[in-house]
Amino acid sequence: MQRCPECDEIILAEAINIKEGFALCPVCGRLTRLSELSFRNRSVVETLEKPPAGCSIMPVGHGVIVRASLRSIMGSLGATAFALFWNGIVSVFVLIAMAGLYANLIGPLPAWFPAPGVNNGQPQMNGGPMNLGQTLFLCVFLIPFVTVGTGMAGAALLFLCGKVVVVIDEFDSYAATGIGFLTWKQRFDPLQVHSITISTKTSESDGQTSTSRSIGIESNRTIKFGSMLHSDRLEWMCIALKELLLKATASRSNTNLPVLTWIPRREK
């Protein structure tokens, strides 16, 4: 259901003017573009009081850590199945490329080397021994296929034990996605944050349309993250960050949230 981005009240269909592209909130009277409406079944209060599994807000010193898990059994199983299938095929050609490099740079292959099509210690191609030029071409040709396989293996691990963490600290604030110390960090200035939104990206391939959503923080730079989060975790994290970074303490929907005294309190 559609909600007012100002007061979070439900906006009924009769208050929406599709032709003009605006909606009028019956409670606060704000006129909002349809693209700016919040679409959630639960209110901000309900969302913050009952966070999804794997989500937490933890005060640390003068800062706070907002954490959301990427764990998804179905996502992990799907990514793992694709990675095994893809990498199983690609590994055959990788072994051939490795065999070609060994034979051309070192010498005949050992008998135990598991490369197909080996004759007298030399990998074969087009009816003859694979020369160095053919080997280098195969190595370059395999780069995108190996990249896809590595990416899918990484996605399977992320869906199994990955997380999205947003650290809001006076001296170092960032959004990080990854596993343990293997994370990708995007830093931002919490004092300059003026907008936090959920953006939707639509892509089309082979006649199939797919959409992905991510959180965008507009500060001294614009960063986007969280595209792998489940929808309820994505919405929870976006709401939590808005409450922490953009709302004055007195006007928060949940007064139990940590107070960052070093951030100027301003209404958004």
Image (cartoon, grey):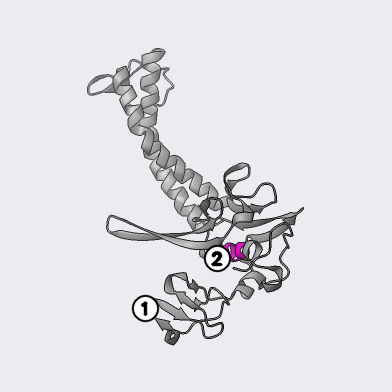
- Tell me if I can see residue 82 in this picture: yes
Q: Secondary structure at mark 1?
A: loop
Tell me, yes or no, whether the two marked residues, 1 and 2, touch with CB atoms within 8 Å.
no
Q: Amino acid at mark 1?
A: Glu
Q: Is residue 3 above or below residue 144?
A: below
Side (left or right) of 109 relative to 44 = left
* Crowd tier of the residue under label 1, counting other residues whose Cα lies within 10 Å: few below 14, some 14–19, many 20 or above: few
Residue 234, percent across and down?
A: 54, 62
Residue 97 picture quarter: top left
Q: Is residue 240 magenta?
A: yes
Residue toward you, 102 or 200: 200
Residue toward you, 254 or 128: 254
Q: Give the residue number, with chain letter if any, for mark 2.
A: 235
Q: Residue at x 33, y 15 (%)?
A: 120
Q: Is residue 89 magenta?
A: no
Prevalent SS, magenta region: helix
Residue toward you, 256 or 67: 256
- Tell me if I can see residue 1 in this picture: no
Q: Residue at x 43, y 74 (%)?
A: 34
Residue interval drawn in magenta:
236-242
Q: Residue at x 58, y 76 (%)?
A: 43
Quarter of the picture containing the C terminus is bottom right
Residue 182 picture quarter: top right
Q: Amino acid at mark 2?
A: Glu
Q: Is residue 85 above or below residue 210?
A: above
Residue 21, percent across and down?
A: 38, 76
- Of label 1 and label 2, which has the lower sequence position? 1
